[in-house]
Amino acid sequence: MNHIHLEEVDPLEIEKRSFEIISEELGDRIFKEEQELVIKRCIHTSADFDYADNLCFSKDAVKIGIHGILSGAHIVTDTNMAKAGINKKVLESFGGQLHCFMADEDIARSAKKQGCTRAAASMEKAATMKEDLIIAVGNAPTALVRLYELIKEERIKPKLIIGVPVGFVNVVASKELIMSTEIPYIVAKGRKGGSNIAACICNALLYMIRDQKLDLS
């Protein structure tokens, strides 16, 4: 029999133990309190410690996002995978709702008519909403590019943009565009990201409120 050591961990303590390991491996690195909780959850989701360096936060982005959620902001995301991963029950407890328009028939028609991606068309639909919005993009750089254009056209002003699309074509540039606006943002610089990262950043904000992990004064 192979001599493989397995930790004995109570199933209810696995997440806690995971965060302990993350803290141990980060060593003496120091992060701002509100950013640390987001960074560690991204590492927990991906097992990728690059997020300790890649995640960029505009001034007070986390607190602004949390205040948005507390005031009933809705979250719009670009994939049903991210939508499935975000804790809807916690969001709804603060009056917000979760949206992904990618599979909507009107989005398919609009994208075909304009010759653009469904993700870009989804941002146009988001711009018609009257609610305060948090935009969480985990897959499509075209969503961020169109969102940037809509911001410049003053057709949309999200409370917070979570910009973490993954890939190669225009991914880096689309994130740089978002960071050039005056809208608060949490962005994963470079090529890394994904729907799971978009969802976990949303959840990090939701859980900070639920678990009262942050002084919002």
Image: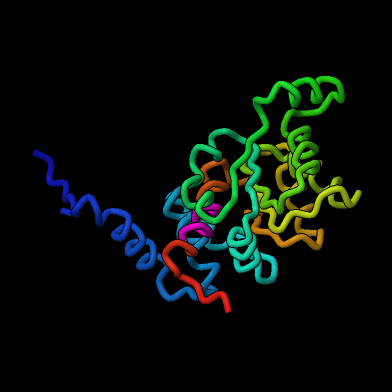
Q: Residue furthest left?
A: 1
Q: Nearer the viewer, residue 153 or 143?
A: 153
Q: How is the image coloured?
A: rainbow
Dominant secondary structure (helix, strand or loop) of the stretch shown in magenta? helix
**Placement of the C terminus among the 4 image quadrants:** bottom right
Where does residue 113 sit, x and y in percent of width and height?
Answer: 86, 21
Q: Is residue 197 above or below residue 117?
A: below
User: What residue is rendered at 71% in x and 53% in y?
Assistant: 132
Which residues are drawn in magenta? 201-207
Where does residue 183 sit, x and y in percent of width and height?
Answer: 77, 60
Indicate whether residue 37 is drawn in magenta.
no
Horizontal side, residue 16 vs residue 39: left or right = left
Horizontal side, residue 47 vs residue 183: left or right = left
Q: Which quadrant of the structure image shows residue 76?
A: top right
Horizontal side, residue 201 vs residue 144: left or right = left
Q: Nearer the viewer, residue 144 or 126?
A: 126
Where does residue 140 sit, x and y in percent of width and height?
Answer: 68, 37
Where does residue 68 sit, x and y in percent of width and height?
Answer: 64, 61
Q: Residue furthest right?
A: 153
